[in-house]
Structures are given as structure tokens and as C-alpha cells.
Amino acid sequence: MNILKKIDDYVSVFTEWLLGTSIILMAVVLISNVIARKVFSNSIPAADEIGVTLVILATFSGIGYAAKKGRHIRMSALFDAVPLKVQKILIILISSVTCVTYIYVCFIAFEYIEYTKMLGRVTSALEMPAWIRVVVVPIGFGLGAIQYALNIVMNIKESQVYIGTEKMATEENNGI
């Protein structure tokens, strides 16, 4: 389990870097485009395309990271109202369903990438293959599925209730 923790930590550091870099690049490109449009009356041709690509990158690369930190969307009204033993059962059930769903969506995303490759679509401004923009989708859902699987294992092994592999739910904070 120790080697899995190290791999998980490296993936988290890389994901943090990727998220930060993509947000900063997005801001630089889109703000530069606004300045170019206002000052020079001419837009940067690929700015919108780059912005959308970076939004896709930030959104889907952050799925596993949010799951690890316990910052994903969850139904906390019912969860917070029940005792810790029921919370443990609920979190294992919720994590199991979410893990299976993420694996399914990961599979669908791979099929979509193959379909997009088959069509030979390219983006309009950069003329790069369109499938390259969405390759991060199955990676993000795959990493999310791994985080939920780790969460299931942690909740089975440990006495505490983990809502993410780094975040515990306790009676004091009621899962917040």
C-alpha cells in the first residue's frame, strides 16, 4: 500500500501543476485576445480554441484530484444526519456506484475518441486532430475511478469514515 501512496502523491503533484498551469495559460491567452481585439482590432485566431481546450483539460484532469481531496459533489444532507456507522456504509455504497459509473464513462470516452479519430475531424484554427482535445476525458474519469476504489479500500480497512482518500468525516465536522 505504501507504493500506491507514493504513486498517488506523484499523480496529485502532477495534477496540481497541470490544473494551475492550464488555468494560468487560459487567463493569459484569453486576456491577450481581449487586449489584441481592443488595441489592434484583430483577435488571435486560435484563442477561443486554446481556451476551450484548456477548460476541457482543467475540468477532466481535476476529477480524480477532487475525489482525493473529498471536494467532489455529494449528497451531504442525508449523509450528515446519520450516525458514523451508517455514514461508513453510505460512503462505501456511494463510492462503489461512483467508481463503476466513472469506469463506464471512461469506456464511453474511449469509444468517442475512436469515433472522432475515424471521422478524421480537425479543429478549425489550429487544424489539430479533434480527438487530441478530449484524450484527457477518459484519463480524468480513470483517475477518478481509482480514487474512489482507494476510498472504498480505506473505508473498509480503517475505522474512520473517509469521504476522500485525504479527507475524513467526523462527528465534529459532520463531513464538511
Image (tube, rainbow, N blue to C red):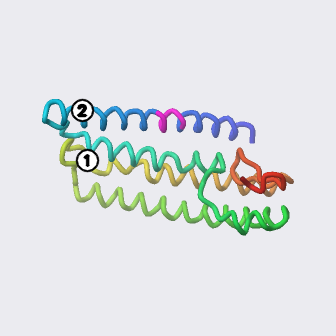
Percent of width and height locating residue 76: 69, 63
Q: Which residues are magenta?
A: 16-20
For this orientation, the residue located farthest to the left is 41
Task: Inspect the image, locate mark 1, and give the three-letter code of the amino acid beneath it.
Answer: Pro
Q: Nearer the viewer, residue 34 or 146?
A: 34
Mark linked to residue 35: 2
Q: In 3D space, how far apart are the residues under numbered discs 1 and 2 (Cα atoms)? A: 28 Å
Q: Please name which of the two marks, 1 or 2, marks the residue nearer to the observer.
A: 2
Dividing the picture into quarters, in which one does residue 7 lie?
Answer: top right
Q: Is residue 124 left or right of residue 67?
A: left
Residue sitting at x 71%, y 54%: 163
Q: Is residue 19 magenta?
A: yes
Quadrant where the N terminus sits is: top right
Residue sitting at x 48%, y 34%: 20
Percent of width and height locating residue 158: 83, 52
Task: Inspect the image, locate mark 2, and give the three-letter code of the amino acid beneath it.
Answer: Ile
Q: Nearer the viewer, residue 64 or 20?
A: 20
Q: Is residue 62 magenta?
A: no
Residue sitting at x 60%, y 34%: 10
> Is 90 rendered above or below residue 7?
below
